[in-house]
Amino acid sequence: MALIVQKFGGTSVGTVERIKNVASRVMATRQAGHQVVVAVSAMAGETNRLVALVEALTPSYNKREYDVVVAAGEQVSVGLLCIALESMGCRAKSYLGWQIPFMTDDAFSKARIVDVVGEKMRHDLDAGYVVVVAGFQGVDANHNITTLGRGGSDTSAVALAAALKADRCDIYTDVDGVYTTDPRIVPKARRLDVISYDEMLEMASLGAKVLQIRSVELAKKYSVPVRVLSSLEENSQGTLLTEESNIMENVVVSGITCDKNEAKITVRGVPDRPGLAASIFGPLAQANINVDMIIQNISASGETDITFTVPHGDYQQAMQVLQQATQVIGARDLLGNPEIAKVSAVGVGMRSHSGVAQKMFQTLASEGINIQMISTSEIKISVVVDEKYTELAVRALHDAFELDKEMPGRISG
Amino acid sequence: MALIVQKFGGTSVGTVERIKNVASRVMATRQAGHQVVVAVSAMAGETNRLVALVEALTPSYNKREYDVVVAAGEQVSVGLLCIALESMGCRAKSYLGWQIPFMTDDAFSKARIVDVVGEKMRHDLDAGYVVVVAGFQGVDANHNITTLGRGGSDTSAVALAAALKADRCDIYTDVDGVYTTDPRIVPKARRLDVISYDEMLEMASLGAKVLQIRSVELAKKYSVPVRVLSSLEENSQGTLLTEESNIMENVVVSGITCDKNEAKITVRGVPDRPGLAASIFGPLAQANINVDMIIQNISASGETDITFTVPHGDYQQAMQVLQQATQVIGARDLLGNPEIAKVSAVGVGMRSHSGVAQKMFQTLASEGINIQMISTSEIKISVVVDEKYTELAVRALHDAFELDKEMPGRISG
């Protein structure tokens, strides 16, 4: 007998029929002899409907009350799922954030988890109940309702699995796992059986929008085995996220990701004096603009160029903010280009294998793709290229690293 | 400075615009220097939507989970109202049943109130907040969400007023008060400025569907002054429900009510032996059929007739149940008539004034209306007549007791 946490997103509980399907799936796991905790999102479209009601009242809403409103979505779906389970003869009990309690800080609308008390749930599990928990919501020390931010149900599920020391956390979604790259770009992209937390973190932040990043961080911190699998297919094997040490032999590159949602900005001819970088990035931070890749070369002739990327949506504002800053610091020029893409190769095997960067650059060069920026971490190499080359670059790299071929030495999820 | 509880129903908070209107009204009371607690229903249509989702899953749903689902409706409206108030610069804080706590028993979907803890609300009121409470919902001793049954928000509001010892409980609704009779039947029906709790209880149970009966019982028990007034009109005076002792001089008859929602059943030739009445009403109780008026005359020749009324919707089933019972007890005959109406005159003044019944019977006789059954309480006389005479009877009685004329000696609400 294992203890399994299952998470179902809004699409999976979007209609009465789908709720019944989820109930059947949960019941099958229960009948296989396992204890089951289910974390559920609001029915598809419901959170958007509630947010629209709030925003129709005022653009600058009170955040405590915003959380009260939007938390109602998950309340409805947990109740409905329990009713479906009970009607099939499966004992079930719903838990809202405050009933667990799922303790968070009081940062309304983007609360951080403080503690998840497993005692009551464990009692009900031992009494034979399926425990159905409202995702996305918690409660602060003063008994106020809080929410974790959009997409927070993945994080709820992993936190529950960590608190209950569950044997596994299964995240049911509309894709059947994590792929070597976007299958819409590379049809022969392959589903990975296993991936390490670190690789997944790089994949997630680079645009493979399968899991909320916070949930992967949490899974890594508490070593929760997480499986991402399809709620639509009956026998989906999915992808198992696990610790690197559980993977028999690391492949060099696990996946290729791309992100078109960035723009590139260069401040040219910055006088090479201490504190000037702060004069550039300070105003951006004040304007709440996240800066991603930053590159500064060693200076020649007493001045330097600083290049970085910002989210596409913040590009216009960033250029305005910097127009002023460049004058203040006496930089020569401000250049911007929103038509770029970031293409990355991710893999824990990079640590022990040299030549990955070389192979990447050579592959792009042979396709005539110019590299505009390079940034690396221990397990990732990212390059910025002209946006029009995105798909070409991804396909070429996927081929070069032979990602369509099954690798030996991986354990299967 | 007074402490006023205001209750707004689903229609009053049915759209974003209407929620803003409610917020303006609350703010006006606050700016007049009063402390305000607001009890709110779910947005119009929302509870029906949630109930439909539940019933689409199964007709015999788990009641604990039903309460979890339907309580979400009020959660949304309290949050939205607080957001509207805060956006107008009025500090506001929402409370759900469990946050108060609004303690009930664990009879899910029709819970009874056990205790309402006023401490936290009082603290927020003293700190300058408008307190906005989700109507209809509570929490049991085991931290389960409960609901009070449909229309329970009136009861929530009165319970809050009682717990906080509020100076008044204003129930905003879509009518501007309690009338001497149904204005659709008698156009010159007059709004009452004041009415006693007892009269209102008789009025409510007899079909003047202005307030939930439980809320009136509660108001009477804790002597809460309740005002029923229109949420649509700016200067609605409404009707004040108060103790009889607060009304300077009681008029004999306050109102005429009618109820077409009953059917009449007669069991003829019942042998006059102890225990036989139980043999008739036992099976009805088992079938969950509420019996209203019961009349049994003194017996002649060792047998008697028993006549009573049941709700219209239960008529067919009641007849089936009784077909068997009459055979078992050896009664002669079973007669039924669903086409009847109950017409009543209500007034606390009846206690000290004789001749009311006489005047009532004479008035009906002069219109050629035959009286089929009579039942009286201390402050009410009800007669059952052929359904087709309903409106005629109501108009004739309204005229006979001169209810269109303003009575002297009433204090004004």
Image (tube, coloured by chain):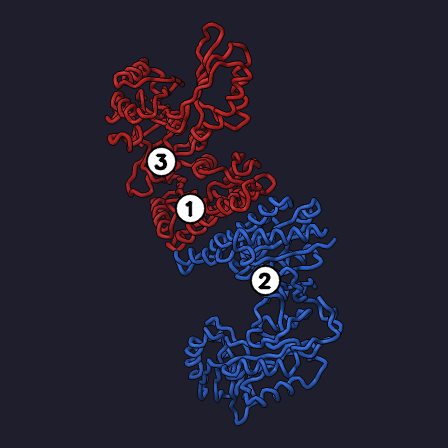
Chain colours: A red, B blue
Front one among B348 and B301:
B348
Do the dots labelled 3 and 2 sit on one chain?
Answer: no
Res A228 label: 3
Q: Are marks 3 and 2 in contact (CB under 8 Å)?
A: no
Q: Are marks 1 and 2 on the same chain?
A: no
Callout 3 amino acid? Val
Measured Cα–Cα span from mark 1 to mark 2:
31 Å
- Residue A297: x %, y % from top left: 44, 11
1 or 3: mark nearer the eye: 1
Question: Rounded to the nearest whole Å, what is the CA distance between mark 3 and mark 2?
Answer: 51 Å
Furthest-top residue in this view: A301
Asked if residue A112 is positioned above or below residue B130 in the image, the reply reads above
Mark 1 — residue? Answer: A45
Chain of the residue on which disc 2 is drawn: B
* Residue beneath the point at 68% across and 53% down: B29
* Front one among A295 and B212: A295
Marks counted in the figure total 3
- The amino acid beneath tag 2 is Thr
* Residue A401 vertical position relative to residue B167 in the rendered view, above or below: above
* A209 with respect to B265 (left or right): left
| Viewer-proximal residue among B211 and B232 | B232
Q: List the residue tagged with mark 2.
A: B173
Task: Answer few, some or many: residues within 10 Å of disc 2's Cα (few below 14, many 20 plus, some between 14 and 19).
Answer: many
Mark 2: secondary structure = strand
Front-most of residues B379 and B145: B379
Circle 3 — which element?
strand
Residues behind callouts 1 and 3 on a single chain: yes
Residue A365, position as x, y percentages in the image: 28, 16
Q: Image quarter for residue A372?
A: top left
In the rendered image, the quadrant that contains the C terminus of chain B is bottom right
The first of marks 1 and 3 along the sequence is 1
